[in-house]
Structures are given as structure tokens and as C-alpha cells.
Image: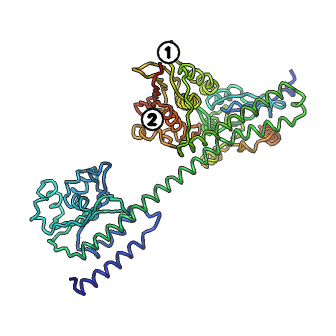
Amino acid sequence: MMHNTESDSLAEKLISLSEVTSLTSVGMSEKQLMALFASKLHELFSASAFALWTFDKDKRSIKLRYGHDLSEPLTSCCLAPVPVEQFPEVKLAIDSGAVWTTEDLNDAPLYDDQITRKLLTSMNVSAVMGVPLRALTNLIGALSFYYKTKQHFSPGEKALALAYANALALSLNNIDSYDRLAALEKTKGEVIHIVAHQFRTPIAILRGNVELLKDKKVVNDPETYGQIVSELEKVGDKLRTFVETFLNVKAIDEGNLQPKPKTVDANTLIQQVVRDMETYRQNHNIALTLTTLPDPAMISVDPMLVAEAFTNVVNNAIKYAKTKAHIEMKREGNEVVISVADDGVGIPQNEQQLIFHKMYRATNVARHPEASSGLGLYIAQRYINTSGGRVWFTSQGEGKGTTFYIAFPQQQ
Amino acid sequence: MNTDTKKQSVLIAEDDEQFRILLRRFLESSYDVILTGDGEEALAVAREKQPAVILTDVLMPKKSGVELLRDLRADESTKNIPVVILLATAFPSDISAAESLHADGILPKEQINRQNLLEMVAKLAAGK
């Protein structure tokens, strides 16, 4: 049973903890949040230091996300992932989902591992408490409290530690959610910018040509009149394509894409795409070569979707090439493989895994003279996958060109 | 040849073919219009032809309009040619770059019509 004095002290500490949580706010950085919680450490606990561990990708290893008054060896060892077994209090708190304590480190065989003991000795640690970190129902890691003297942990102190950890985990979770929302908001702003850019020129062309059509001289000149009407048709098509692109992304996101497969010759499809891009290629002064297969390469795909996917990949190759791009078709096993290689800016190694993400633009092309919505490769990948194909790429890094590969099962 | 009747030339740097043609139609009754599709080509033509006015898009292959303006200003033979930036973007950095490089005019693309374009070009060409 808890004595009154201990109970009063615990109540005061809980009030103090609630003050901390009331001071957290959206938009607060993780550093500010951690400093706020750390400022109450000594008031709430007799611990001299604490470590906040979060899971690495696989949940078998942990990383030090924040440390307060830790020794240098401990800090430097654990910023990279370490096996969770390295810190028994973390492993046991995570496994049991409850607070786990070692009151005297000298009498704890679990800490016999030499590396662990050396790290803890570097801070003169005598007792340890591990507390699971749970944000709502999601276990995100654990807190370690380190004490310089042997301890007897009362149920009240353990409960307080759990409340502290829960409050901290929830605040961290809120900060992460806020950061994700803020990043999304930023992306949304950029996309609105790009969309506005993509619509502005066609609108200007539309308005300008309509103005010309009001000119009597133009009305009386059938040739010029016909040319202007043709310009209006082209710009109408351009605007329709933009709108369709955005609606297609919406359809992909909502799982409403309904391909209509047909058996077609991949040679014909790619030749048509290359023909349609001729003006774009000329404007970029890029040498584009195409090697097709000598005989029909039949694939079963939705030709509209796959033509758009090819167009997006070839468009990128022309846009980012320095001088040339080459498209080559091959048979590999039972697949028809189309490679699209350019000698352009390449894709930075550390961004390669993001390249098919929606609205992602690699940093080395983010301010490329031509605006891009970051939707082309996203759409291409989805259309190719929906049609039973695969798409991947190789790039040796920045400035070393990129080769995209698109493969479909060959039909007999 | 009577030089008084010779039209002045206007150089257009614009990668969108349709927009290039539209600008030519707006201007061709009063000026010799030279069309280029990127900033690099425009710079070379400007040096060679010495146009009265240059109209340039911002986002173009090879050399952007802002880079073109910078290079024109840095070249003794082209530094005094008036340059109008045609904006289809609202990137504040492009606007401020155009201003800091002393573009002679900035025209948002969707606001361009034959009258305001001819007026701006006439004013700049007269001042050359």
C-alpha cells in the first residue's frame, strides 16, 4: 500500500507531467519536444539520463532517436541501427509491453554482454528502467532510464514512467503526423503551381487565336482562317490531355482503372509513339533512334494506356537527354522488353527508390526549365502494371544517363 | 532600298510551337519576326541578327529565359537589346530574377493580346 507522502508526491509529479503535455503543440519540432520532456526528467525521476529508441524498419533492431545526458560512446554507437538484444531493458519492455527494471546492474546477468556493459559503465549506470513507447495502439520503440545508484522502483514510479512514455509517444506521433501533413501541403502547393503553368500557355493560345478569328482580314483569308481553326483544335486536344491525366491519376488512386486489353504488335505501338513525339524531339534537338524487332511482337495490353506509358517514358528521355536517346526492342525469355536509354542527367542514387512515386521529382530536375508534374512515371508504372507488364530502370547516378526497361509477356 | 520602310525585327524565344506561331501572327504585320525554340538558339540569333526587341519564354530547353537574359546582358553586342519576359509561371524566383536582371518588360502569357503586345514592342523598339 502506498503511503500518503508517496501518494502526494506521485500526484504532484502527475500534475507536472500533465503540464508538459499541455505545453506541446502542433508545429513544434522534435528537438523542442524532446527538450521539453527532458527538462522534467530530474523533477519526475531520479534518473540521470534517458534514451529514446525507435524501431528500425524490421523491428529487430533499434536506433537512438534522442538521448538526454548520455555518454558519447553510447550516443555514437547507436545512431545507426543496433540489435534490440544489445539493450535488454528495451527488448524486455518491448516484448512484455510493460515496464521492466534492473535495480542493480552488478547483479544482472542479462547485462553480461561486454559491449553493453562497457557502454553503460561509461555513464556509471547502476540501475535501468525500460518502458515501452506506445502511440495509441502502435508500439514505436522504448525509453531507457539510466540511474547512477542502485534503485528500488516503486509501482508508483513505474506507473509514472509509463505515463511519461505514453505522453511522449503520443506527442511524437502528433509531430510526425503534422510533418507528413505539412509535406503534403507543400507538395500540393507545388502541384497547383505546375498545373497552373501547364494550363496558362494553352489558355493564352486559345484566347489569342480567338482574337485573331475576330479579325476581318483573317475571316476573308480562308488559308489563314483554316490554320487558326487547326491551332484551336490542337490546343483543345492539349487541354483535354491535361485534364485526362489528372482524372487518370484520380482513377488510379481510387482503384477505378479499367483496362481494355487487345492483342497488339508492340513494334507498331512504339513506332506510333515515336512518330507522335517528333515535334517535341525536334524542339529539343535530340537524336532519337529506334530499333524494333524484325517480326511482330504481340502483347496483350490496353493499347491506349500502354501508349501513354511509353509516351511518358520517351518524353522523359528526350526532356532530360543531353544529345541522344535510343529505344530498343528485344525478346528476353517469354517477354518483349523495350529499353529507353538517354545520355542525360541521370537519377541521384539516394532518390532512385522514389522515382515512381506520385508527384515526386528528383532534386536534380526539380528546377529543370521544363515544368513537370511528377506524374508521368507514376502513371506509366501503374498503366504498365495494370496491363500485366513491368517497368524498372538503371542509372549510374547523376550525369550518367538513365535506361528505363518495360517488359510485357509475349503472346503466341 | 528605302531603309525607312524596312521593318524592324523581333526575336521570339519560345519552345511551344503553337505559342510561337500565335506571337508571330500578332506581330508580323508590323515587324520581321524571327522564331527560335530554345534559349541557346535565341542567344546565337540575337548576336547575329541584332533584333530591335526580344520576347522570351522562361521555361525552355537548354537555356531558360532568365539565363538568356543574363547572357544577353553580359554580352557587349546584345546588352542594350530590350527584352520582354513572357511568364507562364508564377514562381516568385523567376519574377525576381527577371526584375534583378532588369528585364524591360514582364508579360503574363494569359494576358497577352495583339494590342498590348504591339504597344509594348513598339515602345521598346522606338527607344532602342
Up/down of A109 relative to A348, above or below: below
Instruction: Give the residue furthest to the bottom.
Output: A4
Q: Chain of mark 2?
A: A
The image position of residue A322, as x and y in percent, is: 52, 27
Q: Residue shown at 44%/41% (left/top)? A: A354
Instruction: Give the residue furthest to the top.
Output: A294
- Name the foreground residue: A262 vs A207: A262
Up/down of B94 relative to A106, above or below: above
Residue named by callout 2: A347
Up/down of A18 relative to B108, above or below: below
Numbered circle sitting on residue A293: 1
Indicate the amino acid at tag 2: Ile
* Residue A364 visible in the shown view: yes
Q: Residue shown at 54%/54% (left/top)? A: A185
Q: Secondary structure at mark 1?
A: loop
Closer to us: mark 2 or mark 1? 1
Up/down of B90 relative to A305, above or below: below
* Residue A326 visible in the shown view: no
